[in-house]
Image (cartoon, coloured by chain):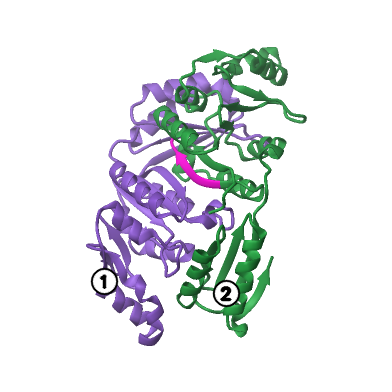
Chain colours: A purple, B green
């Protein structure tokens, strides 16, 4: 569809999400950010705090996608299973990481750190990415970034390494029309079929007095978007076009 | 974990979600509703408008879980691939469904219905669930309910058949404490290990002046929750208990 985009998978880990106690706003944040950076999120999985589930999902996502981001299951309690499960996904042992131990001691102080030092057990070979303004490093094993589930901390950590994910951006045009999807379907299909690398989207709304469908034209190829926009506007009855946004 | 609960999988279908154009509020709604009804959502997948992806995901979810709910990809345009893909997942042909055709004609009127009649092509053997107050039926094939992506319509349809999903409820107790997760970890692990069918959750917050961790105790077995609550409150320093909610 859009050749050249990095293909991402996102894994959200947490019983609290699946049982509706906590809304998953992390995947929403990451999907928006990665798309804005020119990446292509191909799949999101929300899974339980279960070692087998996490290990299998991380393993299969790691093989299928260029880059994987996980959220949740990082901490000192019994339901924090992400690191040992990621280790299992890559057949790595868990080993004491002195760099992480030092970060924990620096944050909590030597005495208080004792109850958190188990968190310095990490998969062998994990990459710790220290950045300015962050007390704890971002963690990465193979092509998998492991983020904590707390939304504020996840955002801070993602933003600290955001530049790593930047690539050629998508171009987008949006056309709002009073026509219904049924009338638009043949035209949209021909645009989708005829114009290489163009992705045509169609989003009906039922409660808006101004328009009935939002049409999106998106591509890394600006000319494909421009051609789609031109052909679409030429084909629509002028009175049916409410607005065009780019 | 909680024996007896129906195991659910949810599949959200739509490029508009993965590219951050539309927030996924459907899975959040369904997770909350199903949990409140006594069900156990075990996995959510957000996937693209891609026939192979949809067919494979629906097939694997249908085998793994008792009941599957899908959202999105239902409509008259080129990116509406859910029905043919669900048909493929179950090796069914697509056939013209006269009941659905009648519903489409009833809603749009005979003339306007023409451009929507392709939507009457449905997997062979699909169950159409007509309910009071709904113009279009809820659709079900094998153990898979197919819902539209529009959040208002999805909610209306789910609520119309909500009673089908009701079973013995979960019991929940929540304890808010000023202790940190590091200090709580051994106690919470012993509760989780010792009390059958109890699920112990631990949710730290970093910006609340009143408490540091919310502990949740949940089970279909009310006595397990009560025993967990009693043991937890006996073990915590009284001054560290901010509040208990049930």
Q: Quadrant of residue A217?
A: top left
Q: Is residue B45 magenta?
A: yes
Can residue A191 be seen at all in this image of the molecule?
Answer: yes
Query: Residue tagged by mark 1?
Result: A97
The residue that appears at 41% across and 32% down in the rendered structure is B53
Relative to the observer, which residue lies in front, A241 or B13?
Answer: B13
Q: Position of residue A26 (x, y in %)?
A: 47, 55
The answer to whether residue A153 is left or right of residue A96 is: right
Query: Mark 1 falls within which chain?
Result: A
Which residue is the site of mark 2? Answer: B208
> Residue drawn 38% across and 64% down?
A157
Magenta residues span B41-48
- Tell me residue B40's x, y (percent): 57, 47
Spot occupied by residue B140 in the image (x, y as percentages of width and height): 60, 27
Q: Magenta segment, principal secondary structure? A: strand
Q: CA distance from mark 2 to mark 1?
A: 31 Å
Compared to residue B54, the image places residue B184 above or below, namely below
Q: Are marks 2 and 1 on the same chain?
A: no
Q: Position of residue B79 (x, y in %)?
A: 47, 28
Q: Quadrant of residue B145?
A: top right
Q: Which quadrant: the N terminus of chain A?
A: top left
- Front position in the image: A236 or A146: A146
Q: Is residue B145 left or right of residue A58?
A: right
Secondary structure at numbered mark 1: loop
In the rendered image, the residue lying farthest to the left is: A125
Mark 2 residue crowding within 10 angstroms, few (<14) / some (14–19) / many (20+): few
The subunit letter for the residue under badge 2 reads: B
Residue A197 to residue A43: above or below = above
- Please give the name of the residue rendered at 41% of the width and 49% of the height, measured from the top-left corner: A53
- Please, which residue is most extreme toward the right here? B132
Q: Is residue A239 positioned above or below B15 on the image?
A: above
Residue in the image at 74% along x and 29% along y: B131
């Amino acid at each position: 569809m859009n050749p050249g985009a990095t293909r991402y998978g996102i894994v959200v880990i947490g019983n609290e999400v699946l049982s509706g106690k906590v809304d998953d706003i992390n995947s929403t944040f990451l999907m928006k950010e990665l798309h804005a950076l020119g990446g292509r999120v191909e799949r999101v999985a929300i899974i339980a705090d279960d070692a087998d589930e996490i290990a299998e999902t991380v393993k299969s996502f790691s093989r299928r996608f260029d880059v994987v981001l996980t959220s949740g299951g990082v901490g000192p309690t019994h339901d924090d299973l992400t690191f040992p499960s990621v280790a299992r996904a890559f057949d790595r042992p868990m080993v004491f990481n002195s760099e992480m131990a030092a970060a924990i001691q620096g944050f909590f102080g030597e005495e208080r750190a004792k109850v958190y030092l188990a968190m310095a057990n990490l998969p062998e070979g994990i990459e710790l990415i220290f950045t300015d303004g962050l007390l704890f490093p971002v963690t990465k094993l193979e092509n998998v970034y492991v983020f904590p589930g707390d939304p504020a901390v996840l955002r801070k950590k993602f933003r600290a390494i955001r530049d790593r994910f930047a690539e050629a951006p998508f171009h987008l045009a949006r056309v709002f029309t009073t026509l219904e999807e049924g009338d638009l379907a043949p035209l949209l299909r021909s645009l989708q079929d005829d114009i290489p690398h163009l992705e045509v989207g169609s989003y009906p709304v039922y409660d808006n007095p101004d328009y009935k469908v939002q049409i999106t034209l998106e591509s890394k190829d600006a000319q494909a978007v421009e051609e789609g926009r031109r052909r679409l506007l030429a084909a629509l009855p002028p009175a049916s076009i409410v607005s065009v946004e780019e």
